[in-house]
Amino acid sequence: MAESRAQLGEKPVYSVSTRIIFFVFLSTFLTALVVSWISIHSIHGHLRRQLETGFPAVLQRRVSQLDAWLEAGRDALEQQAQSRHLTTALDPRKVEPRRLAARLQEILNASPHFSGLALLGDDGQLRASAGDIDATALGDGGTGTALLGVQSSTLGPLALARAPLARHAAGPGPTLVAVFSSAGLRNQLWIEPDESPGQILLVNAAGSPLLPGWDEALPSAHSELPGSRLLQIGGDQLVEYTSAEGQHMLGSVEQLTTLDWLVVVAAPFEQVFAPVLSVVTRIFLCDLAIILLFSFLAYKITGAIMQPIEALSEAAARISQGDVEHEIPTPRSNDEIGLLTRTFNDMMRKLRLSQQEIEQDKRRLTEQNEELQRANEVLAQLSITDGLTKLHNHRYFQDHLTREIKRLRRTGEPLSMILVDLDDFKALNDRFGHAAGDEVLMGIAALMNDSVRGSDLLARYGGEEFIIVTPNTNLAGAVAVAEKIRMSVEQASQIVDDSMRPVKVTISLGVAEYDGDRRRFFQAADRALYRAKAEGKNCVIAADAAE
């Protein structure tokens, strides 16, 4: 199960479902990207067109309003200059300076345009003043009505209006000078937030603000505004520029007709195009939602289509691994996939039936092979086992001796042989019968089998003769083994008939060590056994090396 899943999932990037989902995602992403780009580009162009008409329009309205306000102030100043209250202003016999200053204060209080008034004599010297007045910035004593901007050492930039008194209109004489109110200037330049996103500044030709405190409203736009460059381009255009602080700005400029000052509409680019950024954010969120929605739908639809196909692929992988027990859940649909699934399940059921039949035949064949193998093992064991004593027989002894001789030729280890023969076995058979003789043979075989070592081979050579092969044992060691066997037989008693009378049986043993020749090896042991018989039986004789 795990292996089949691993095989199916080796390359998920190249799976059909992954490719479908990726295609839907890529198509949706590209579509959303194109639509977003078109929308943002259109909104940006529309907003810029509005700004290109809106900024200059606002600017023109404020410039016209400010010019009209300045002109109205100048006209009001001329009317006051024609007033008879000021015609005798320079005659100390008629008007005291203190009363003249009081009169100027009354005029100042009644005027919304001015923050200070001053009366200059024929010599240009200050005779009386009211409000904020800086004598160093009052200008020369020339004749004629004038409107000018000057720089005060104490009050900063000032807008001044000069008007000669009536009785001296034909030539140089006393002059009435008015300082326009900064608050009034601000009021004329004020714009509502919904009218324009920018701020209006009153600046000189160098771009420096003229109204004290005005730069606080737009801290990033007051430094070195490019008024001259904007004037060269024209007051009806929207210009992009970079402030001294490196901020991206938008602005438009126009010069007053009454003064040599400039009125600038300026705003940070980010502030102006904040609606575009807001729209971009909303479009991005909408695009992201659409992409996620379509990707999720593609995932669900692809999963519904690919799930039965993956189940078929997994089942095919299981079959390739020999698992035919798996069955795919049958889908409810009757489409091609449903038909393929049902056909596949039918094929699997038939395959399982065939496999069950094959398994049954295989089990029967295995059982028969096992029975035959057990029979062969029994036959093989019988072929190398003596039927009476259950020891190995003469055939097995010959094969074993061949293997031992090959082994010792490789290792050089010693090999010895012990021939055993029961003493007076014929007389025992004649006295007690052959059945009793067979019982004695079985008893003697059991005694010797208990006495030999685990590495030794004990076999029945024939009749009442036995043979023992002792690997890795020299002649002296084999004699010790033979003596142990002889004593165990001598000390034991054999029961040979129903009378339960014990019978003592002895054996004679001949011992020889292998000298490189198989035939001499056996003959030496046989001659040693013969000598044991000749020397009185019940003894162990070792073959001499000279034999």
Image: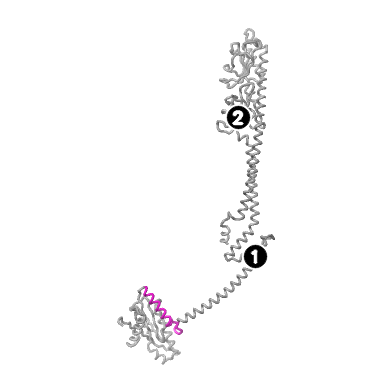
Place of residue 82 in the rendered image (x, y in percent of width and height, measured from the top left): 67, 13
Characterize the local packing of mark 1: few (<14), some (14-19) or many (20 or more) Cα atoms within 10 angstroms.
Answer: some
Place of residue 122 in the rendered image (x, y in percent of width and height, measured from the top left): 60, 11
Q: Residue at x 60, y 29 (%)?
A: 217
Q: Is residue 375 left or right of residue 356?
A: left
In front of the other: 236 or 216: 236
Q: Please identify the dominant SS of the magenta region.
A: helix
- Tally of numbered discs: 2
Q: Quadrant of the N terminus?
A: bottom right
Disc on res. 345: 1
Q: Amino acid at mark 2?
A: Ala
Q: Quadrant of residue 15?
A: bottom right
Residue 525 highlighted magenta (yes or no): no
Extreme-front residue of the structure: 233
Extreme-top residue of the structure: 93
Q: Which residues are magenta?
A: 385-410
Above or below for 27 versus 211: below
In front of the other: 3 or 20: 20
Q: Secondary structure at mark 2?
A: helix
Q: Quadrant of the C terminus?
A: bottom left
Q: Amino acid at mark 1?
A: Asn
Above or below for 443 versus 211: below
Residue ID for mark 2: 217
Q: Secondary structure at mark 1?
A: helix
